[in-house]
Amino acid sequence: MMHHFNGTKPDPELELGAHNAINTCLRLQPGEKVTLITDKSTLDIGESLYRAIEAVGSTCSVFVLEDFAPRPHSNMPKEILDDLATSQVSVYAVNGQVGELRTRMQMTAVVTKHRLRHAHMININRQIMAEGMRADFNRVDDISKKVWDLARSAKHIRAKTPVGTDIQAEFSSQLRWLKTSGIISSDKWGNLPGGEVFTAPLMVEGTFVVDGVVGDYLCAKYGDLHDCPLTIRVADNRMTEVYSDNKELESEFWNYCHTDVNSERVGEFAIGTNIQLKRVIGHILQDEKIPGVHIAFGHPYAEHTGANWTSSTHIDVVGTKFDIWIDDRKIMEAGEFLI
């Protein structure tokens, strides 16, 4: 069932970020149809996005998830999936709940099939709208292109941090690198705020110390891990050990990454490129775009990267203050690009 906003005045704190999302990132055109999916906890952000869509002169179907059934949902409502199939642009501005990754995968399958320009704003909040969503995404796109040009022919990348991360990754020319800089095209839906270049790695070995954040619903629960990092050992592209002084985090993360046979497998290797971001705020949507490296265990976005395996889970882990070498060229020192 479609939702109708009641005509309240635009929120000035959200207005610029919403305008950036609709006009700069999605490049919405008059006459295009938009599917906007939101929920009760982000209704103010949903309305700001709707006002920006309305100002362009586009048709917009608005759906609030709680209007369909109590959450968490086990499946994305069919009415939403059907509406997506008739749109050119879509926005998902929702606070994620435990067990809803399946619904998002159902949604993005339709997005990919129909080549929508899709803004994925999972766990968006007012702080991110006022910070990361105010970035100059054209500048972010420029640095992302430079990283993508170097990475797409890379055989090896090494990444290190002062707190103990030291990983080596190998890459295959058969697996595609993608650029999601915030400028969204029909070729690949993108998270907003944008700013990353990523692929499915052929192999990752070493230690990754998470002194930033972990992803999915665990991010909201544990936040910034600076004072209590999570250490992950990886061998033969699979997690072999995790350790944290926070034993609840250690256990919950380990269990999440053993949901299915590939949940412990490194499915994503990414370099953050949003040069506007300088600090961790405890939200994966923004923090994974901080210049540096993040990896994810589980689903390798096979439909885009060309990986020949899948998983029902996907969880990112973010570190800080990276030195990065692409083959033998150093491209980052202490979290600052050298290119």
Image (cartoon, rainbow, N blue to C red):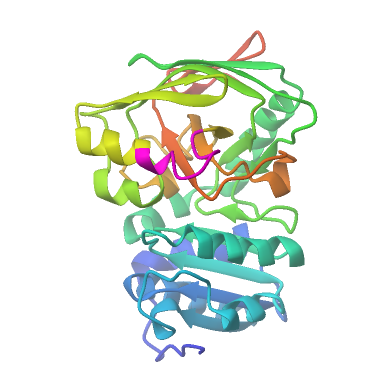
Name the residue nearer the viewer: 40 or 179. 40
Q: Report the magenta residues as a range.
A: 255-264
Position in image of residue 56 (x %, y %): 62, 77
The answer to which image quadrant residue 334 occupies is: top left
Q: Is residue 20 visible?
A: no
Locate the C terminus by quadrant.
top right
In the image, residue 173 above or below residue 190: above
Seen from this angle, which residue lies furthest top? 328
Measured along the vertical axis of the image, is residue 335 above or below residue 136? above
* Membership of 252 in magenta stretch: no
Q: How many callouts does the rendering have?
A: 0
Position of 24 with respect to 334 (left or right) is right
Front position in the image: 80 or 337: 80
Classify residue 24 by image quadrant.
bottom right
Residue farthest right in this picture: 174
Q: Is residue 331 left or right of residue 216?
A: right
Picture residue at 38% right of the left edge, 69% below the top: 72
Residue 275 in sight from this viewpoint: yes
Measuring from the top left, give residue 233's x and y in whole percent: 42, 20
Q: Position of residue 312 (x, y in %)?
A: 54, 50
In front of the other: 269 or 252:
252
Residue shown at 37% from the left, 83% from the top: 9
Answer whether residue 263 is magenta in the image: yes
* Above or below for 310 versus 29: above
- Looking at the image, which residue is at 43% across and 68% down? 15
Magenta region, mostly helix, strand or loop?
loop
Question: Is 229 placed left or right of 272 in the picture?
Answer: left
**Horizontal placement of 85 versus 258: left or right?**
right
Percent x, y of residue 85: 70, 76
